[in-house]
């Protein structure tokens, strides 16, 4: 398959999030999408199936997400850059192909547009697939998970997901949500190589050149082992590679940390509300900062530790019942865990506005000020 | 010698193979190896194994081979074939993988007429996990999960997979049932199935009646009798769809 370039000169566009994903995948050289319908990611398949023939790319609507995932793995191992997209219960089914990708180092790229859970719940929005994308499957969570905060990041991070999946050979997920999927925003589309982004050309793991057994060794790929030691010997280097790559992979955004008395931590679209809230609060003279993990796996452990050393009081806001908060606790660990003061604003399956975060942050700051005042008066 | 005892495409370094004594898998893989040898297509083959006893075939051939997950070898091979149409994709699986946990893949790959070959080893039992009832277990068959025998009123009748997909198989499909009791005819069936792919006509599905004395708890005589009589009576051998 050839890769006719879908984007040459940079272009300013106004697009839906699902459309942005498709342009990013085209720009990153994705050759084939295997997908199954589930809201709110359907338009990824729609735009792709319309655009794919124009750029000589392929599409297959499969019978379920298991099939989409395993066909994607088959396509990648046969040497093509393939990806898929899903949501909610589809993300659950995707754990099976994702775990095979972890074990066999297959660069599976998966776009997840979160919907409400548990169960069928809503088709609209949530941030409830954090654990599922970061640690789902029977294994060790050897994946890269990006949480974009804007359509521009949706474009940038989808391209990055392809680049890093193929560079480091771990599955890479872009964790968007129904709001991002279904709203329109201005985005700059660009050709990745023109911005110095290196996208490794795909290479096959099976169907290699030459007669196997005569001109070369046959390629034999396994994921089942007979004894515990055999598994450990196979798995340990994969875990080591993940830890080795983690510092280069982690990404975050932060602001107004220096003199902050409270740090608002949020990811994805809520991270954007958090940043807006902090900017408003600063205008009112409130000493508040923000921290937004962009990679949820690997988590920017050291960055958040640094921030919490400077200011151990944080407000975690998320559209889930504490999934990000738990990731923070794991990241912080040890001594710091006991010294941090964590306030939470959990709204599972609900959107969070900057006004709500301002209100919550103000209430924490004012309470703290009253406490210290009453301590002085006593 | 008119017939090689070991097909050229078998990997010598991994023989003797890892299947139990009396297991039919070796004979199925012999028939496949003979067919690949005769068509001289080893270079094009991507061989995928399901999970269950079929996973033991992961290093059996001098083919590029991938061990997949239970029931998922069909979509895996579909994916490989869709991006590299010149490959000969072979999905190797048991009856549990094909007719229970992965049946949706077999049905939909047949509906789409995906240009892949599916080999289903039917030994009427989940063998690797210790002998539970399979979709193909015969009425009255004693298994670990049907200690009093499969009771059709409760557990249903065995699934005739090839007949099921033959009922809607599109033009160009090749669907057959063979048996390990006749390896040379089985190898001819495999060859026809592979030719069907090489001619880009449609999907090729071959079910093979096979033996599992370990889980059947039968001696050589009863093993053979079960295969030749009970199984063959319920699952007729022959071509169901061909052109």
Image (spheres, rainbow, N blue to C red):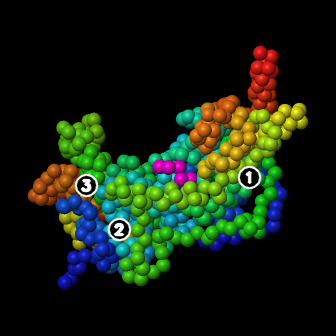
In the image, which is nearer the foreground, mark 3 or mark 2? 2
Q: Position of residue A225 (x, y in %)?
A: 36, 58
The residue that label 3 is drawn on is B123
Q: What secondary structure is the stretch in magenta mostly built from?
A: loop
- Closer to the camera in the image, B41 or B8: B8
User: Sequence-wise, which precedes: disc 3 or disc 2?
Assistant: 2
Disc 1 from disc 2: Cα separation: 44 Å
Q: Secondary structure at mark 2?
A: helix
The residue drawn where x is 40% and y is 74% is A218
Same chain letter for marks 1 and 2: no
The residue drawn where x is 66% and y is 53% is A250
How packed is label 2: few (under 14 Cα within 10 Å), some, or many (20 or more)?
many
Disc 3 from disc 2: Cα separation: 22 Å
The subunit letter for the residue under badge 1 reads A
- Closer to the camera in the image, A48 or A225: A225
The residue that label 2 is drawn on is B59
Side of A217 where A365 appears, left or right: right
Quadrant containing the C terminus of chain B in the rendered view: bottom left
The subunit letter for the residue under badge 2 reads B
The residue drawn where x is 54% and y is 69% is A79
Q: Which residues are magenta?
A: A139-143
- Closer to the camera in the image, A68 or A330: A330
Side of A125 where B222 appears, left or right: left
Q: Position of residue A358 (x, y in %)?
A: 80, 31
Does residue A374 appear anywhere in the picture? yes
The residue that label 1 is drawn on is A153
CB under 8 Å between callouts 1 and 2?
no
How packed is label 1: few (under 14 Cα within 10 Å), some, or many (20 or more)?
some
User: Is residue A140 one of those drawn in magenta?
Assistant: yes
Residue A118, which numbered label?
Answer: none
Quadrant containing the N terminus of chain B in the rendered view: bottom left
The residue drawn where x is 64% and y is 47% is A301
């Amino acid at each position: 398959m050839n890769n006719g370039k879908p984007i040459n000169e940079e272009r300013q566009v106004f697009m839906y999030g699902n459309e942005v994903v498709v342009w990013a995948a085209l720009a990153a050289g994705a050759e084939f999408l295997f997908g199954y319908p589930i809201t709110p990611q359907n338009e990824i398949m729609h735009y792709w199936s319309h655009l794919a023939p124009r750029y000589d790319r392929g599409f297959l609507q499969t019978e379920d997400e298991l099939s989409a995932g395993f066909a994607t793995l088959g396509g990648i191992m046969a040497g093509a850059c393939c990806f898929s997209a899903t949501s909610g219960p589809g993300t659950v089914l995707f754990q099976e192909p994702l775990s095979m990708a972890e074990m066999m180092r297959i660069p599976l790229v998966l776009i997840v547009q979160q919907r409400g859970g548990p169960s069928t719940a809503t088709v609209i929005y949530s941030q409830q697939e954090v654990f599922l994308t970061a640690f789902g499957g029977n294994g060790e969570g050897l994946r890269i998970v990006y949480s974009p905060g804007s359509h521009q990041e949706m474009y940038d991070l989808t391209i990055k997901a392809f680049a890093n999946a193929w560079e480091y050979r771990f599955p890479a997920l872009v964790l968007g949500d129904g709001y991002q999927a279904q709203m329109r925003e201005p985005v700059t589309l660009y050709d990745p190589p023109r911005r110095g982004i290196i996208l490794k050309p795909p290479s096959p793991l099976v169907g290699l050149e030459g007669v196997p057994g005569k001109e070369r060794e046959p390629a034999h790929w396994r994921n089942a082992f007979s004894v515990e030691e055999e598994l450990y010997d196979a798995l340990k280097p994969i875990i080591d590679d993940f830890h080795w790559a983690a510092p280069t992979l982690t990404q975050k955004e932060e602001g107004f940390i220096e003199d902050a008395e409270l740090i608002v931590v949020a990811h994805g679209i809520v991270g954007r509300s958090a940043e807006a809230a902090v900017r408003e609060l600063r205008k009112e003279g409130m000493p508040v900062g923000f921290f937004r993990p962009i990679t949820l796996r690997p988590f920017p452990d050291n960055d958040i530790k640094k921030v919490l050393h400077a200011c151990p009081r944080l407000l975690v806001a998320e559209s889930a019942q504490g999934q990000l908060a738990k990731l923070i606790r794991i990241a912080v660990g040890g001594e710091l865990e006991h010294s941090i003061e964590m306030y939470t604003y959990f709204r599972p399956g609900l959107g969070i506005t900057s006004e709500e975060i301002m209100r919550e942050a103000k209430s924490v700051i004012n309470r703290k000020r009253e406490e210290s005042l009453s301590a002085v008066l006593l | 010698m008119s017939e090689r005892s070991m097909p050229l495409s078998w990997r010598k370094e991994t023989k003797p193979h890892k299947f139990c004594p009396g297991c039919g898998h070796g004979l199925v893989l012999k028939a496949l190896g003979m067919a690949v040898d005769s068509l001289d297509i080893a270079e094009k083959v991507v061989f995928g194994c399901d999970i269950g006893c079929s996973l033991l075939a992961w290093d059996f051939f001098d083919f590029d081979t991938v061990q997949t997950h239970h029931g998922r070898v069909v979509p895996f091979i579909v994916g490989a074939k869709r991006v590299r149409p010149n490959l000969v994709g072979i999905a190797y699986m048991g009856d549990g993988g094909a007719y229970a946990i992965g049946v949706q893949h077999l049905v939909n790959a047949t509906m789409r007429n995906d240009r892949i070959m599916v080999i289903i080893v039917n030994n009427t039992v989940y063998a690797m996990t210790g002998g539970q009832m399979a979709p193909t277990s015969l009425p009255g068959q004693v298994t670990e999960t049907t200690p009093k025998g499969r009771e059709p009123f409760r557990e249903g009748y065995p699934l005739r997979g090839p007949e099921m997909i033959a009922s809607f198989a599109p033009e160009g499909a090749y669907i057959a049932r063979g048996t390990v009791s006749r390896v040379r005819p089985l190898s001819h069936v495999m060859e026809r199935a592979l030719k069907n792919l090489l001619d880009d006509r449609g999907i090729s599905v071959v079910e093979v009646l096979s033996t599992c004395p370990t889980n059947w708890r039968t001696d050589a005589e009863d093993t053979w009798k079960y295969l030749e009589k009970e199984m063959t009576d319920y699952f007729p051998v022959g071509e169901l769809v061909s052109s």
